[in-house]
């Protein structure tokens, strides 16, 4: 019997996948090291530490990339987006710890970098579908990178004095939602795929990029961020209602019912409730190449 390497992938498949992923992540890390050289030690430390954490988490989650044996161009694009996000955090950390203000030129550079990261968001999913390398790993990697980008932009907009502290709610909402799922197990159940979430995520990211642009006055940035936060909150609220009401008719929730019920039993020790959507569809939903938070 062959020894299982990454989450059920035998070693003959796991080794090339692991080595390929590590090589691509290391190459992007080297590029990030060069990019953070103009920053001081606070920015360098924050950017490199965050990217190292992302790389470790990505390597640990490769089992969900089964049965593919290659990391693939799609995941490499997502990793490049993650490196760009780490650089944004580094710039923010430099300003936050040193108390330095953003120059107009630096803000334009940040806008260009964030816009490139957003534009690449549509490339990784397309590549995964085109090359037949879509996986749960790729979808999760993409989604978490999106969430980090929104958080980084929220911090930068606040640091640039383009919006009040409420803008941080935009970046924190995804993580508050995940934390609530640990307290209320129903909120941790899988959600059915909805194009709405991707549209809202792109709209929210675009709004934050616009608010950061020097050409946008502070009062307009404030209004834009308030509108984006309202849009994001409405999307999260809608998903919370679906989850708390049982999510009837959700194929993807039914397909993951066993995993959800197992987590529920381990956490609470109580008899598990009826799985969301159990009485409806039982077929598995197709894997998606990309995703976004609610």
Image (cartoon, grey):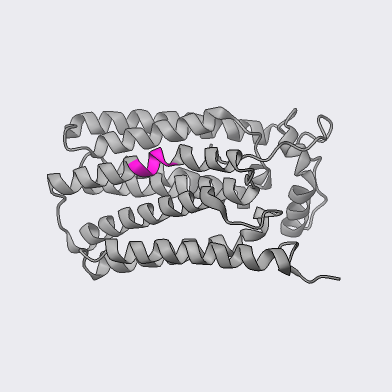
In the rendered view, would you say 164 is above or below 268? above
Q: Residue at x 32, y 69 (%)?
A: 45
Residue 165 lies in the magenta-colored region: no
Residue 47 occupies which quadrant of the picture?
A: bottom left
Residue 137 shown left or right of residue 147 in the figure: right
Instruction: Decide which of 55, 253 is in the foreground and name it.
Output: 55
In the visual, does 189 lie left or right of 198?
Answer: right
Picture residue at 16% right of the left edge, 32% below the top? 217
For residue 73, say whether it is visible. yes
The reply, left or right, for residue 265 in relation to residue 35 is right
Magenta residues: mostly which secondary structure? Answer: helix
Q: Say if residue 176 shows up in the picture.
A: no
Figure check: 271 above or below 90: above
Instruction: In the rendered view, tell whether residue 280 sits above or below residue 79.
Output: above
Location of residue 62 in the rendering, given as x and y in whole percent from the top left corner = 62, 59
The x and y percentages for residue 88 are: 31, 53
Say which quadrant the N terminus sits in. bottom right
What residue appears at the point 56 percent right and 41 percent down from the top-left corner? 290
Residue 277 or residue 108, whichever sits in front:
108
Q: How many marks?
A: 0
Range of magenta residues: 116-120
Q: Position of residue 90 (x, y in %)?
A: 30, 59
Measured as percent of width and height from the top left, residue 275 is found at 79, 40
Q: Is residue 219 above or below residue 184?
A: above
Q: In this rendering, would 95 be left or right of 250?
A: left
């Amino acid at each position: 019997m062959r020894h299982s390497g990454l989450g059920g992938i035998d070693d003959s498949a796991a080794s090339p996948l692991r080595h390929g992923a590590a090589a691509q992540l290391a190459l992007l890390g080297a590029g990030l090291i060069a990019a953070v050289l103009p920053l001081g030690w606070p920015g360098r430390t924050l950017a490199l530490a965050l990217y190292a954490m992302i790389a470790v988490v990505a390597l640990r989650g490769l089992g969900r990339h089964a049965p593919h044996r290659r990391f693939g161009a799609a995941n490499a694009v997502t990793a490049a987006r993650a490196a760009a996000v780490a650089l944004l955090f580094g710039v923010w950390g430099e300003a936050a710890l040193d108390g330095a203000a953003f120059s107009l030129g630096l803000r334009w550079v940040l806008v260009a970098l964030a816009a490139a990261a957003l534009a690449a968001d549509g490339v990784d999913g397309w590549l995964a579908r085109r090359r037949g390398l879509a996986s749960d790993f790729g979808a999760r990697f993409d989604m978490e990178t999106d969430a980090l980008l929104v958080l980084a932009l929220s911090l930068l907009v606040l640091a640039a004095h383009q919006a009040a502290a409420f803008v941080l709610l935009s970046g924190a909402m995804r993580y508050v939602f995940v934390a609530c799922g640990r307290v209320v197990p129903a909120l941790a159940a899988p959600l059915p795929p909805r194009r709405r979430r991707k549209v809202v995520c792109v709209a929210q990211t675009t709004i934050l990029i616009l608010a950061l642009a020097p050409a946008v006055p502070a009062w307009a940035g404030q209004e834009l961020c308030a509108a984006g936060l309202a849009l994001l909150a409405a999307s999260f609220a809608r998903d919370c209602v679906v989850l708390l009401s049982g999510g009837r008719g959700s194929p993807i929730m039914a397909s993951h019912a066993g995993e959800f019920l197992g987590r529920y039993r381990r956490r609470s020790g109580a008899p598990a409730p009826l799985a969301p959507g159990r009485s409806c569809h039982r077929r598995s939903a197709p894997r998606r190449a990309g995703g976004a938070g609610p």
